[in-house]
Amino acid sequence: MGNFNSTSQESFILVGFSDWPQLQVFLFVIILIFYSLTIFGNTAIIALARLDLRLHKPMYFFLSNLSFLDLCYTTSTVPQLLINLHGLDRTISYGGCIAQLFIFLVLASTECLILVVMAFDRYAAVCHPLHYTTIMHPLLCRALAISSWIGGLVNSLVQTGLVMAMRLCGHQINHFFCEMPIFLKLACEDTKGREAKMFVVRTIVIVCPAVLILISYVHIARAVLKVKSMAGRRKAFGTCGSHLIVVSLFYGPGIYTYLQPVHRYSESKGKFAALFYTIVTPMSNPLIYTLRNKDVKGALWKVLGRGTDSG
């Protein structure tokens, strides 16, 4: 068993889905399609938010941030997975693995915080509509977005630092990318102390934001139920419903993976859970917001109409 902290020349072998050879071609095709849709959908959201003046609002500013995160988030893992499934190369250097872990943690934890900011934006819009433009000032919006990125960076630095301090044994990673629970499984030492520290950090980054989102939506639900107009209720529930679906898709698998003890973590189940939050959720977000949002649909048809007219 080698100690990976002793040399930068060591490499890991990513097992990926090679233990399910009958699924590899199917997974390659499906993941390639999903990845293409993710790139197209999230790029479209970012482009629409810039091109259409109706979308120059805080909600769509944060939605653009979410789409950019999803683009980076899925790109940090999926291209390597496609190469892995094609059987071309399953190795990754120790430095590459640590870099992937660091980038993934930055993006994932930033997304946790951006979803909280989006919930606050919906709370301000529904519960304080007369003061909304004053509360969600462009300077505050930028500050909240920057703070989310800084929070994600700090979380990643802490957790990656704890991993780099561990002695790792073995050359095989039973996953398709370098994820935190797998590193803990490879540790040659007692990780209870580090697990406790990581659990505290994860609670701050995952549980606290989830609780804040739930509190926001309790207040939103109360405010919406006081609205007498059914059309007003439908509009509020439609906009907030999209965000709640996105939150559920992101937080559900994330909580399953990161808040259970390492000895209970199943590598096989973990791989499929990871597929969900690295591929399915980033692909679903643009669809959810486009299908349930009249402004985004209007902007999309306007751009498509322009393209047709110019042709």
Image: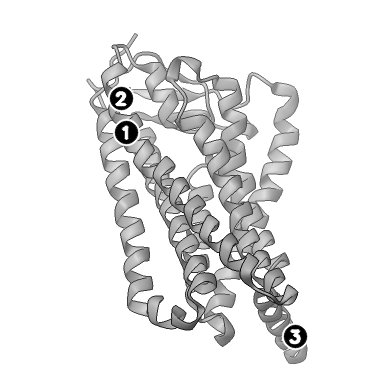
Of callouts 1 and 3, the N-terminal one? 1
Which of the pair 73/16 is nearer the observer? Answer: 73
Going by the numbered disc 1, the residue's amino acid type is Val
Gap in Å between the C-alphas at discs 1 and 2? 6 Å
Q: Position of residue 76 (x, y in %)?
A: 47, 46
Q: Which residue is mark 3?
A: 305
Crowding at mark 1 (Cα within 10 Å: few <14, some 14-19, many 20+): some
Instruction: Report which quarter residue 307 is drawn in.
Output: bottom right
**Looking at this view, is 151 or 233 the one in front?**
233
Q: What colour-coding does the image apply?
A: one colour
Q: Specify whether 229 is left or right of 196.
A: right
Residue that appears at 47% across and 28% down: 91
Q: Residue at x 52, y 60 (%)?
A: 219
Does the CB distance between marks 2 and 3 fall below 8 Å?
A: no
Q: Count neighbours of disc 3 (C-alpha within 10 A) and say few if under 14, some if 14 to 19, many if 20 or more.
A: few
Q: Give the alpha-carbon distance from disc 1 to disc 3, as whole Å.
A: 51 Å
Q: Decide: is 88 above or below 52.
A: above
Quarter of the image containing the C terminus?
A: bottom right
Image quarter of the N terminus: top left
> Mark 2 belongs to which amino acid?
Ala
Query: Which residue is disc 1 drawn over?
Result: 200
Please say whether residue 64 is visible from this viewpoint: no
Of labels 1 and 3, the one closer to you: 1
